[in-house]
Amino acid sequence: MSNNRSDNNNASGRKRMILVSAAALCIIAVFLILTIRARSLPASDVPAAYGTALSLLPPVIAIALALITKEVYSSLFVGITVGAMLYAGGNAETALNTLLYHESAGLVVNLTDISHASILVFVTLLGTMVVLVNRSGGAQAFGRWASVHIKNRVGAELVTVLLGLLIFVDDGFNCMTVGSVMRPLTDQHKVSRAKLAYLIDSTAAPICIIAPISCWAAAVSYAVPEEYNINGFSMFLRTIPYNLYALGTIVMLFALVLLRVDFGPMKKHEENALKGDLFTSGGSQFEEDTVHSSGKGRLSDLVIPVVSLIILCIVGIAYTGGAFSGAGLIDSFANADSARGLVMGSLLALLLTLWLYMSRSVMTLKDFMEAFAAGFRSMCAPMIILILSWNLSGITGLLGAPEFIHGIVEASAGSVQMLVPALVFIVSVFLAFSTGTSWGTFSILIPIVCAIYPADSEMLVISISACLAGAVCGDHCSPISDTTIMSSAGAHCDHINHVNTQLPYALTVAAVCGVGYLLAGIIGFQTQSIAALASTPLTLIVIVAVVLFVRRTQMSKA
């Protein structure tokens, strides 16, 4: 049985490789033809594709290839190559230099960017922490404790969701921490890795975008232009009740878990997990999950490192924002360099873990240092995807994708103001999905929205909420989003499996939210009051009704 599955996987793998190779060759051939015919553009010239629909071609190609071929590395590289060719006007030499060394989008330059380098170091340190907790026996001790207190799959999934909701400071930190802590428990209760990745991803950005004390709140506050005399933080607080996608995603999580409903590709993954196959496909890259523990593990060997990691990372983020220099709590988070703070906090947590384990003779210094190499190896795949995604995002920016989206929103906003929230939501979803960045999306669109409505208008609050919700939704769906990548890494789930299984759930919530913003815009435009808040409970009720409908349909077919 296992041999047949292996043969099938090998055959499908060969077919995918043939597909991706053929697609890549066809796409690159088109641009090589352009290269032969094109002349090198002066550095000051704007590429012909700048600010046009072609500016979105590289991410569209990368995402389409990834979803079709199930192979993410080559798909991203093909998209980057196409973008570099478009930027260079078809000149191969300029394209190569753009791809590697452009000051704001090159592959090498991205690696030297301090924020990007900090994220890579943080991911490595988190991987090291996971290895240490496993080898100390702390993860196994947690599994023994959980087997007594958590009796079924619903309980394991609910604890995962609740832990995700508690870690609201930073989405990447949320993904890695929840994944490393909950993976042994969900494995024990035969929850598929795809379902774990979905639970992690759905409690990362959605909770951060409605948490007043988070890096996301600070980013939104600063995205509101000063010239409009709008208090950015107060505006953020007012958007929370209107953030239909974030609230809807959390409600759907609880509905799916409590009602035991799965649909789309996720249903197959969950059925396979119940039979003992947690991965369905792509599990070979995570064989290092099985480690030999010291046999001396206690529950405290997991709890103390994880709690210290959370506390020290929060302190580290606040420190970079000036909390120790007299800045207030909100100001310190508003001015924080979260990537630098996470590196500082995770390193201190590792040193504390070293002291804890060595004081109890759980492991030697040599074992501890070997964990760094093991942690790095375990995180190589997500780090490669992150690096290529940054490269693709930079190339897309060089081609003027933000300006293209700006023009679409600005041209259509004036004549249909009551439809602006729904329009902004749709555009935000598309932009965040294409570029893989929610922060970049709302930093582009919030100033446009502020220019449409007066500072005291309820429609302004609704439209900014729609922008934030759409940005999180697109980020949630996109295979090139940092959060999606880190969710796959935290769950040790094949990245494309995570994207494919999550999309039906995310798009279901997005469709209901689109109608919700249409309703909110109509009510808000006509009444200019908080009566538009009626759209929020209606949207959440419809989401629960959809889950109930799916459950009833499945039961009738059973």
Image: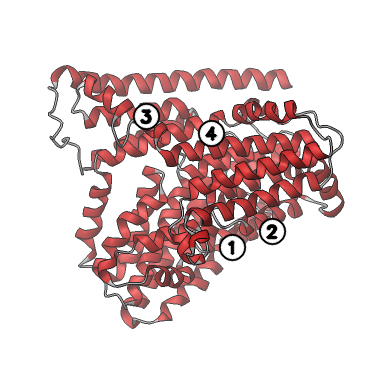
Q: Using residue 488 as the reference point, say whether residue 466 is left or right of it.
A: left
Indicate which label's residue lies in the foreground, 2 or 3: 3
Q: In this rendering, does residue 493 appear at all?
A: yes
The tag earlier along the polypeptide, 1 or 3, is 3
Q: CA distance from mark 1 to mark 3?
A: 39 Å
Q: From the viewer's perspective, is residue 314 above or below residue 26?
A: below
Which is nearer the N-term, disc 2 or disc 3? 3
For mark 1, what is the residue? 251
Say which residue label 2 marks: 259
| Residues at circles 4 and 3 in contact by the CB criterion of under 8 Å | no
Which label lies toward us, 4 or 3?
Answer: 3
Q: Earlier in the sequence, mark 4 or mark 1?
A: 1
Q: Nearer the viewer, residue 270 or 210?
A: 210
- Could you tell me residue 468's position as x and y percent? 41, 60
* Secondary structure under the numbered disc 3 in the rendered image: helix
Name the residue carrying label 3.
107
Please state which amino acid type lies under the numbered disc 1.
Answer: Val
- Relative side of 250 to 188, left or right: left
The nearer-to-camera label among 1 and 3 is 3
Q: For residue 382, which numbered disc appears in the image?
A: 4
Q: CA distance from mark 4 to mark 1?
A: 29 Å
